Image (tube, helix red, strand yellow):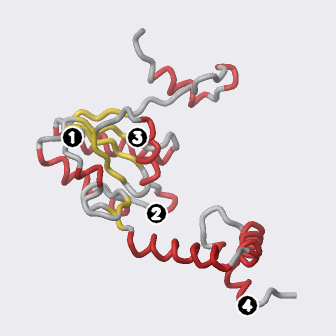
């Protein structure tokens, strides 16, 4: 027995979201059907507004309603430091710390030969253009500690260092409260590499 067409289309729509398989999509579709009409309308309006009103900052690539984004427009931030992240969600994570006061640059992905993503497929060209202004003295690469994130960090370092700009990488390693015996080799290696003087 097949679902009625409106439910089938709703399931298909949910399956287009990352990490949503057919079972989860089906559960979400039936949940949506049981929602109050006002809640469904608000949900639909929120989707449309997000699509219509949000765009990427022309300077850093962050998601924003205004261009430039509030961070790029804030002249009180340290203009000499740019922290490079994979996606806009990473900026929100960094901002919650309230410790970093420089600028950002969003790559919108990482290099991934397996997925066919090369340097031209992510936001590298605009980063290199930003670095030509002589104001930026340090680029902090904050890509994830995945093979693709590491490859992207290495690639960026090789591109940027010849320009005389300092390139640093966020330290990776043991999380607070973890035991050494349960850490994998890569985590331990990053912990040793990222050690600091006491």
Label 4 and label 2: CA atoms lie apart by 35 Å
Separation of marks 4 and 3 at Cα, in angstroms: 45 Å
Q: CA distance from mark 2 to mark 3?
A: 22 Å
Residue at the disc numbered 2: 116
Q: Among all residues in the image, which is located at the extreme top?
A: 198
Q: Earlier in the sequence, mark 2 or mark 3?
A: 2
Residue located 38% across and 71% down the image = 53
The residue shown at (51%, 71%) is 46
Please name the residue that numbered disc 3 is placed on.
142
The quadrant where residue 157 appears: top left
Q: Which residue is mark 1?
A: 76
Q: Residues within 10 Å of mark 4 (few under 14, many from 20)?
A: few
Q: CA distance from mark 1 to mark 4?
A: 54 Å
The answer to whether 79 appears left or right of 170 in the picture is left
Percent coordinates x, y for residue 121 in the rendering = 37, 63
Residues at marks 1 and 2 touching, judged by CB atoms closer than 8 Å: no
How crowded pointer 3 is (Cα within 10 Å; few <14, some 14-19, many 20+) is rated as many
From what the image shows, is residue 90 above or below residue 176? below
According to the picture, the residue beneath numbered tag 4 turns out to be 5
Q: Identify the mark nearer the N-term, 4 or 3.
A: 4
Q: CB of mark 1 within 8 Å of CB of mark 3?
A: no
Q: Residue at x 29, y 53 (%)?
A: 70
Tag nearer the camera, 1 or 2? 1
Q: Estimate the x, y position of residue 33 in percent, counting from the top left.
A: 74, 78
151 vs 6, left or right, is: left
Q: Earlier in the sequence, mark 1 or mark 3?
A: 1
Element at label 2:
loop
């Amino acid at each position: 027995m097949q679902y009625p067409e409106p439910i089938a289309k709703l399931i298909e729509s949910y399956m287009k979201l990352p990490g949503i398989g057919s079972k989860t999509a089906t559960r979400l579709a039936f949940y949506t059907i049981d929602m109050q009409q006002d809640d469904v309308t608000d949900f639909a309006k929120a989707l449309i507004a997000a699509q219509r009103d949000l765009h990427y900052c022309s300077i850093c690539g962050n998601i924003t309603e205004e261009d430039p984004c509030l961070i790029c427009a804030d002249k009180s931030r340290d203009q000499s430091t740019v922290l490079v992240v994979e996606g806009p969600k990473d900026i929100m994570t960094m901002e919650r710390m309230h410790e970093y006061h420089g600028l950002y640059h969003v790559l919108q992905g990482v290099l991934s030969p397996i997925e066919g993503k090369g340097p031209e497929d992510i936001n590298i060209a605009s980063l290199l253009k930003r670095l030509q202004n002589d104001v930026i003295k340090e680029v902090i690469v904050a890509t994830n500690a995945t093979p693709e994130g590491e490859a992207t960090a290495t690639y960026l370092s090789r591109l940027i260092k010849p320009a005389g700009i300092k390139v640093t990488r966020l330290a990776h390693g043991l999380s607070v409260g973890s035991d050494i015996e349960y850490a994998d080799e890569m985590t331990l290696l990053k912990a040793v590499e990222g050690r600091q003087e006491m």
